[in-house]
Amino acid sequence: MEKYYVATSWDASGHSPAQAEIDQGIESLTKFPGSHTYNISCWQPHLENDKDKLTNRIWQWIEHYCRAKLDYSSMRLADKQVWWLCSPESLVVENDPVMSTYEQIFTRQHLASQVLDSDTIYDTTRDNWDNHHMDTRTAMIRGVLPRAYMQLHCMMDYMYSKLGYFPIVLNRPMTLAKEFNAEFGSYFGHTPVLPLCFSTYYSMPRIVKHNTTQRELVHSANGAITQFKPYKVYEHAPGKKELPNSHWWIDGKLGPALSQKEKEQEYVLKRHDFPDTINDVNFDLTKDLI
């Protein structure tokens, strides 16, 4: 895997991947080592009928709720998105007594309950899986989450190393399942889903994040233990964490670091017309996604 950078701003001279290239990236998941996978799907909002309106709304949603440090004025240049979701299997699979006996599969009701109460799956004191020795918390942490991230990293690597596209990746949506379903649930027929991570790709960054440790590895004296050197965190004023270490991307290379003032100018955040509090979300548990 080549070393590459994650962007925070796009340059207008670049271009988005063709749909055939996004399809190749998703197809690459079938060639990446991994065990069987349940309850994971990829969503491409740009393939929905109202793609322009939807993808623009998603960027507003990300800015409003996730507060990710990005140059939002340039984000629409990357016109394709791939989301990883924790989603229900078909009703046939979900109601198969053999499958439900031997496999750990989250049902629609599990996911709906998790959307409405974020402790549902992770609270081991609840009797939410009475036919398995494994609890739902373990199944999520051991099964769904690592497999989703393996797929995401596989696609990121393919899109960059094979096709030359830089990524932007966010996992903050994972904490916003209620807000996600309230705003975008109609695209899933109001079947409950859990957003896990978001990705988008583009050929030319304008600004990239850069880890000051150069991803340096450190080792124990005998070499038996290896880990990444932790990067330093700075305050630009007492009690105020410095914005992400960022560099201009110039002529295909890492350029000078942005000053604190430049980062404040680039990473301006706005609020949009989304509710601050969502009390309830309505679901339809009778439909299949696919």
Image (cartoon, rainbow, N blue to C red):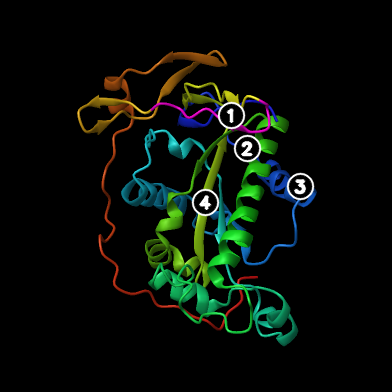
Left or right of residue 49, residue 231 in this image = left
Which residue sits furthest right? 31
Q: Which residue is mark 3?
A: 32
* Dot 3 amino acid type: Phe
Left or right of residue 138, residue 60 in this image = left
* Dot 4 amino acid type: Cys
Spatial CA distance of label 3 from label 2 is: 21 Å
Could you tell me which secondary element the residue under label 3 belongs to? loop
* Magenta highlight range: 222-232
* Occupied quadrant, residue 72: top left
Q: Which residue is mark 2?
A: 17
Could you tell me which secondary element the residue under label 2 belongs to? loop
Say which mark, if any, is on residue 203.
1
Q: Nearer the viewer, mark 3 or mark 2?
A: 3
Q: Tell me which label, 3 or 4, sits earlier in the chain.
A: 3
Q: Tell me which label, 1 or 4, sits earlier in the chain.
A: 4
Q: Is residue 56 magenta?
A: no
Cβ atoms under marks 1 and 3 closer than 8 Å = no
| Position of 10 relative to 33 (above/below) | above
| Position of 139 relative to 204 (above/below) | below
Res 190 visible? no
Spatial CA distance of label 1 from label 3 is: 23 Å
Mark 1, residues whose alpha carbon is within 10 Å: few (<14), some, or many (≥20)? many
Could you tell me which secondary element the residue under label 4 belongs to? strand
Q: Which residue is mark 4?
A: 197
